[in-house]
Image (cartoon, rainbow, N blue to C red):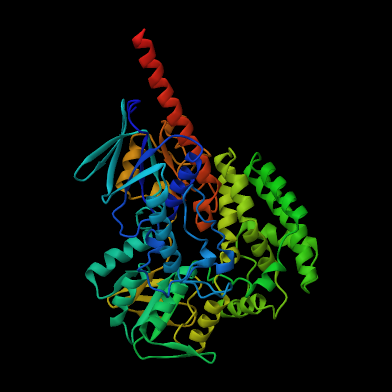
C-alpha cells in the first residue's frame, strides 16, 4: 500500500449523484478525525455531481417522477458545508406538488459538488477527465489505467459509474442490424436534447416507442411540446411539426399509474407506526428465509395496512381480497390488470385525483413506495441468499408500475394525446413486429401499422452477464467482481466492498449503485445515493486506511529496533 508518510488517497470512478453522496459522507465522517484524503475523480463529464441522468443541460421536458415535497435529500453535513436543502433551491417553482425537471436537480447536485470542492477541508479533490480502462491491484496499492496514462497508487477505489453500457438484447440487436441496411431509423430516448434535435425531421411520420414507462412520458413531451405543440383547456393542439402517429408498446401494455395528486391525498396512504414496525420485522425475517417463504412473509405484512386504507377510502374489500391479489402479483406481476391500456390509464388518473376509490394495486403500490427507505435499510445491510435476493428484487420491480408512478399531469397529457389521435395504444400490449424495408410493421389483432422510426425507451437491466463495459468485463475476468446470480448485479458487502470469485474480497475496491442490484435493492432511487450505504462505505474506508497506516508504522518501528 502507499507508504505511511503519504496522505491517504482514493480514486472515484464516476461522479454522478452516487459518487457525490459517497464523498459527502466521507467528508462528514472525516470531520471527527485528523485525516485528510487526496481524491482523484475519474469522469470526463462537465457537470460533476449531476451525472448524465440529471445533467443541467438536459431538456426541461424530462421530469422527475417524484414531487418536490418528496425529495428529502438532506443538505450536506460536513464541516463548512454551505449549500441549502433542495426545497429552498432558487430554480424551483415554489409549489411542493410540482414534479420538477431532472435538470434542476442536476443544477443542485452540481452546486453541492462545488461546495464540497471548496469547503470540505478533509478532502483534496482532483478531476481526471478520462475514461478508466483497467484497475490493477499491486503490492503498493491500486493503480488506475486510462487510454493515455497510469495513476496511483491508491489506498481505495470506489466504482460509482451508474448504468454501464450493455449488450443489446436479441430484439434490439436485430433492429440495429436492420437499420444499417434499410430506411428505418433507430434512436435512443436519452439524452433528450439529442432526441429533440433528431425529431425535427420526423414531422408527419409514424413513430413507435419500445417501452411504456416513465422514459416514454419524457419522449412524448419531447415529440409534442418540444416540437411546438401545446396542451390547452384539456386538449392537445398540434403544431404540425410533430409525428403523425406515436405508438408506444411494452411486453405487458401496462403504463405506470400516477401518484396521488397532492400532499393531502397522499397522506391517506400513510402506514401507521405500528404497521411500519411490523413491516420492518417481516423484512428482517424474510432476509433469512427461502425465496418462496420470504416473499410470502413480506406480502403478508402488506395485507392488513392495505385493507385498512381501502376501507377508509371507500373500497370495503377484505384482507382475503388483498391476500389473493398479492398471490397473483408474486406469481405473475400485472396479471390482475384486465382493463385495456387506455381504460387503465383513465382509472389510474381518477384514483390519483381522489375521484375514484383506490384499487388494491394502487394502495399496495403507495404503501410500498412509502416503505422504500425501510426496504433499503433492511435489505442492504443483511446477508441474503442469492435466490431470496432475486425474489425480493423481482417483487420490488413488479410493483414499480405503482410505486414509481408519474405525476397526474403527465398521465392526463397522455390521455389528451390519445384523444387528439397523436398517440395510439392499439398495439401497446406486446405486438408482433415485422422488419420491413421502410422500417417496422406493428401488428395487432385488427390492423398493421408501418413505422419508419423506432425509439428505444427501455432501461437495460444492471445484470453483470449483459454488461458491455470494458472496465467491468476486465474486473470480472480477473475475479475482482462476481454476480449475485444470473440476471443480477455484483456481489458486495454492506459497506460496498466487492466480493470476487470464490468469495475472495480484495481489500480496497468497492462499488455503490445500480450495478450492485441484488446486493442492494431499490438502487434507482435518488435518495439511495445519499443514504446509509454511503455512510457505511465512508466508515469502512476510514477504518481500512487507519489499519493500513498502523501496520506501516509497526513495520517501521520493528526495523528501527
Residue 161, given in percent of the width and then of the height, sits at 38, 50
Count of all numbered marks drawn on residues in the image: 0
- Residue 115 sits above or below residue 93 on the image: above
Q: Nearer the viewer, residue 330 or 514?
A: 514
- Residue 173 sits above or below residue 155 on the image: below
Q: Nearer the viewer, residue 170 or 467?
A: 467
Q: Is residue 303 left or right of residue 457?
A: right
Residue 55: quadrant of the picture: bottom left
Q: Is residue 120 visible?
A: yes
Residue at 31%, 51% (x, y): give it. Answer: 43
Q: Is residue 191 left or right of residue 287?
A: left
Residue 514, given in percent of the width and then of the height, sits at 46, 51
The residue at the far top in this view is 561
Q: Nearer the viewer, residue 45 or 473?
A: 45
Quarter of the image that includes the C terminus? top left
Residue 97, given in percent of the width and then of the height, sits at 58, 73
Residue 286: quadrant of the picture: top right
Quarter of the image that includes the N terminus? top left
Q: Nearer the viewer, residue 109 or 255?
A: 109
Residue at 39%, 43% (x, y): give it. Answer: 123
The residue at the far left in this view is 148
Q: Is residue 492 visible?
A: no
Residue at 52%, 61% (x, y): give it. Answer: 85
Residue 552: quadrant of the picture: top left
Residue 481, given in percent of the width and then of the height, sits at 40, 38
Amino acid at each position: 500500500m502507499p507508504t505511511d508518510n503519504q496522505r491517504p488517497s482514493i480514486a472515484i470512478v464516476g461522479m454522478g449523484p452516487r459518487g457525490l453522496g459517497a464523498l459527502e459522507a466521507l467528508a462528514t465522517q472525516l470531520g471527527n478525525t485528523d485525516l485528510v484524503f487526496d481524491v482523484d475523480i475519474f469522469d470526463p463529464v462537465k457537470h460533476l455531481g449531476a451525472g448524465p441522468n440529471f445533467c443541467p443541460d438536459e431538456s426541461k421536458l424530462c421530469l422527475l417522477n417524484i414531487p418536490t415535497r418528496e425529495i428529502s435529500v438532506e443538505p450536506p453535513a460536513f464541516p463548512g458545508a454551505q449549500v441549502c436543502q433542495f426545497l429552498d433551491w432558487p430554480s424551483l417553482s415554489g409549489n411542493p406538488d410540482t414534479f420538477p425537471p431532472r435538470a434542476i436537480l442536476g443544477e443542485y447536485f452540481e452546486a453541492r459538488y462545488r461546495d464540497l470542492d471548496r469547503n470540505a477541508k478533509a478532502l483534496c479533490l482532483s478531476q481526471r477527465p478520462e475514461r478508466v480502462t483497467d484497475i490493477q491491484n499491486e503490492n503498493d496499492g491500486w493503480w488506475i489505467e486510462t487510454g493515455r496514462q497510469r495513476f496511483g497508487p491508491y489506498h481505495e477505489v470506489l466504482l460509482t459509474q451508474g448504468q454501464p453500457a450493455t449488450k443489446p438484447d436479441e430484439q434490439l440487436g436485430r433492429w440495429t442490424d436492420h437499420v444499417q441496411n434499410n430506411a428505418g431509423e433507430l434512436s435512443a430516448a436519452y439524452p433528450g436534447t439529442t432526441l429533440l434535435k433528431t425529431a425535427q425531421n420526423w414531422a408527419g411520420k409514424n413513430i413507435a416507442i419500445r417501452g411504456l414507462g416513465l422514459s416514454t412520458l419524457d419522449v412524448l413531451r419531447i415529440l409534442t411540446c418540444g416540437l411546438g405543440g401545446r396542451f390547452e383547456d384539456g386538449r392537445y393542439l398540434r403544431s404540425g411539426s410533430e409525428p403523425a402517429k406515436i405508438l408506444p408498446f411494452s411486453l405487458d401494455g401496462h403504463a405506470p399509474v400516477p401518484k396521488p395528486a397532492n400532499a393531502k391525498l397522499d397522506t391517506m396512504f400513510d402506514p401507521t407506526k405500528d404497521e411500519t414496525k411490523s413491516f420492518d420485522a417481516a423484512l428482517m425475517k424474510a432476509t433469512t428465509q427461502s425465496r418462496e417463504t420470504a416473499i410470502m412473509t413480506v406480502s403478508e405484512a402488506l395485507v392488513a395496512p392495505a385493507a385498512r386504507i381501502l376501507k377508509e377510502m371507500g373500497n370495503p374489500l377484505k384482507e382475503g381480497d388483498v391476500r389473493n391479489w398479492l398471490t397473483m402479483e408474486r406469481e405473475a406481476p400485472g396479471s390482475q390488470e384486465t382493463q385495456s391500456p387506455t381504460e387503465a390509464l383513465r382509472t389510474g388518473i381518477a384514483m390519483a385525483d381522489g375521484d375514484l376509490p383506490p384499487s388494491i394495486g394502487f394502495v399496495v403500490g403507495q404503501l410500498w413506495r412509502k416503505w422504500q427507505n425501510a426496504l433499503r435499510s433492511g435489505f442492504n445491510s443483511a446477508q441474503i441468499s442469492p435466490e431470496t435476493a432475486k425474489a425480493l428484487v423481482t417483487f420490488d420491480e413488479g410493483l414499480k408500475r405503482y410505486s414509481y408512478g408519474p405525476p397526474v399531469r403527465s398521465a392526463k397529457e397522455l390521455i389528451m394525446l390519445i384523444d387528439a389521435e397523436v398517440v395510439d395504444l392499439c398495439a401497446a400490449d406486446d405486438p408482433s413486429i415485422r422488419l420491413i424495408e421502410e422500417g417496422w410493421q406493428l401488428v395487432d389483432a385488427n390492423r398493421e401499422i408501418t413505422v419508419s422510426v423506432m425509439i428505444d425507451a427501455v432501461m437495460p437491466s444492471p445484470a453483470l452477464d449483459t454488461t458491455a463495459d470494458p472496465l467491468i468485463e476486465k474486473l470480472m475476468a480477473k475475479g475482482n467482481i462476481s454476480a449475485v446470480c444470473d440476471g443480477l448485479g455484483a456481489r458486495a458487502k454492506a459497506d460496498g466492498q466487492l466480493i470476487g470469485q470464490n468469495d475472495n474480497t480484495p481489500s480496497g475496491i468497492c462499488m455503490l449503485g445500480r450495478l450492485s442490484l441484488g446486493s442492494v435493492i431499490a438502487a434507482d432511487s435518488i435518495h439511495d445515493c445519499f443514504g446509509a450505504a454511503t455512510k457505511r462505505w465512508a466508515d469502512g474506508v476510514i477504518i481500512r486506511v487507519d489499519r493500513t497506516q498502523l501496520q506501516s508504522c509497526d513495520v517501521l518501528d520493528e526495523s528501527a529496533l
